[in-house]
Image (spheres, rainbow, N blue to C red):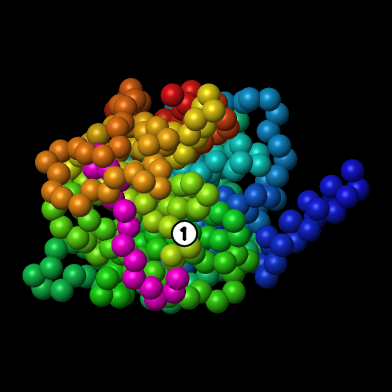
């Protein structure tokens, strides 16, 4: 028992090495991810930075409690003294230690929006997480997309808002997708944690079947770490909607790599969130989309010898998938080995948090 306590203490010390007490500053809060021991990572796209915070939310959840909160945007608005139409839920993440759900929230819209971290208690009531006196550390990206409007004749908005599009923690590293200031601007990074120096990102290229061409400027929208064979990979989803495989060991500073396009799930669509889970001894991907709903992919199709898409695709191709009847899902995370937690549209403009059995 004493030996186990020492191991746990050592793990906590390792994860919080370099953290200092204080109040972290944020220009925005977008993507969230958890490490063990209640450490949360919060991406700030406007500042092109990631902050790690020791929440001390490590008490294990009792039983198999589920979460349900109707009109969570209206409840958060009431807490913040505003109207529901001024609340944007940017991301959802479940703390695996306590199984409590956290939301990255923007109060207001545009450049004056205020970022807020919200925790949803087991009874469905939200509470604002105070960041006045917390232990934290911060990593700034050295080569983010520029904070400026597009040049004359170019499409799109401020590319800085896509400097970080998704994050995850795996095996002592914070994995980051987004856009850099490189010519091949689509970028993946593997940042060692605890944070020290942050190197340049890895420029990534993919073949986009729906567009019939190679692309280097389209950002990864959402990804999950996943082992293919014995090697750790990332499975990354892009707009329109290719699913691409990258070997994690190829993510080296300043390198340029090409991913393997495994599937095209349909154009005119944007992937929103993705998880990987196990059921009946098999692994599955669950991908929420803006136009294609939620789809389920049997991961056993993803093998070292899986076919790569290298030609134009009219609609869908590659990995077989199944449509899941979960309407209106905008955010998605795994609660435990039986349930997912989602943010989904409800009546009118309401957004609900619900617990759904993994399909």
Q: Nearer the viewer, residue 218 or 114?
A: 218
In the image, what residue occupies the spot 48% across and 34% down?
Answer: 283
In the image, what residue occupies the spot 62% across and 26% down?
Answer: 65
Q: Position of residue 32 (x, y in %)?
A: 49, 51
Secondary-structure class at tag 1: helix
Which residues, given as a range, are shown in magenta?
252-265
Decide if residue 187 is on the left or right side of residue 195: left
Answer with the quarter of the image where residue 251 lies: bottom left
> On the rendered image, what quadrant is the N terminus found in?
top right
Residue 79, above or below 18? above
- Magenta region includes residue 254: yes
In the image, what residue occupies the spot 46% across and 47% down?
Answer: 228
Residue 310 seen in the figure: yes
Answer with the quarter of the image where residue 170 lies: bottom right
Residue 83 seen in the figure: no
Decide if residue 170 is on the left or right side of residue 83: right
- Residue lying furthest front: 305
Answer with the quarter of the image where residue 342 lies: top left
Residue 337, above or below 157? above
- Magenta region includes residue 316: no
Q: Which residue is mark 1?
A: 248
Q: Position of residue 345 (x, y in %)?
A: 34, 31
Decide if residue 132 is on the left or right side of residue 80: right
């Amino acid at each position: 028992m004493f030996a186990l306590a020492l191991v746990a203490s050592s793990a906590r010390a390792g994860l919080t090495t370099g953290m200092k007490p204080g109040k972290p500053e944020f220009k925005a809060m977008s993507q969230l991810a958890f490490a063990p021991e209640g450490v949360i990572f919060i991406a700030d796209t406007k500042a092109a930075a990631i902050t790690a915070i020791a929440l001390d939310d490590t008490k294990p959840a009792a039983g198999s409690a589920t979460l349900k909160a109707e009109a969570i945007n209206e409840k958060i608005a009431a807490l913040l003294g505003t109207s529901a139409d001024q609340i944007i839920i940017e991301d959802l993440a479940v703390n695996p230690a306590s199984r409590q759900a956290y939301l990255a929230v923007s109060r207001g819209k545009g450049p004056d929006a205020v970022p807020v971290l919200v925790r949803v208690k087991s009874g469905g009531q939200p509470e604002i997480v105070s960041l006045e006196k917390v232990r934290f550390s911060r990593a700034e990206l050295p080569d983010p997309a520029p904070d400026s409007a597009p040049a004359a004749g170019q499409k799109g908005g401020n590319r800085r808002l896509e400097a970080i599009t998704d994050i995850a923690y795996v095996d002592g590293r914070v994995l980051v997708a987004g856009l850099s200031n490189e010519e091949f601007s689509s970028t993946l990074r593997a940042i060692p944690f605890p944070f020290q120096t942050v190197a340049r990102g890895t420029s990534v290229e993919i073949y986009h079947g729906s567009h019939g061409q190679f692309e280097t400027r389209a950002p990864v929208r959402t990804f999950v770490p996943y082992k293919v064979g014995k090697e750790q990979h990332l499975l990354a989803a892009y707009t329109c909607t290719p699913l691409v495989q990258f070997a994690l060991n190829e993510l080296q500073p300043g390198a340029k790599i090409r991913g393997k396009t495994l599937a095209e799930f349909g154009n005119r669509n944007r992937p929103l969130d993705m998880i990987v889970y196990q059921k009946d001894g098999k692994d599955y991907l669950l991908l929420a989309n803006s136009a294609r709903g939620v789809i389920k992919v049997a991961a056993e199709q993803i093998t070292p010898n899986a076919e790569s898409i290298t030609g134009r695709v009219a609609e869908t191709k590659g990995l077989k998938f199944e449509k899941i009847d979960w309407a209106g899902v905008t955010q998605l995370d795994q609660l435990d080995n039986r349930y997912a937690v989602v943010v989904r549209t409800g009546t009118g403009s309401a957004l609900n948090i619900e617990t759904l059995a993994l399909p």
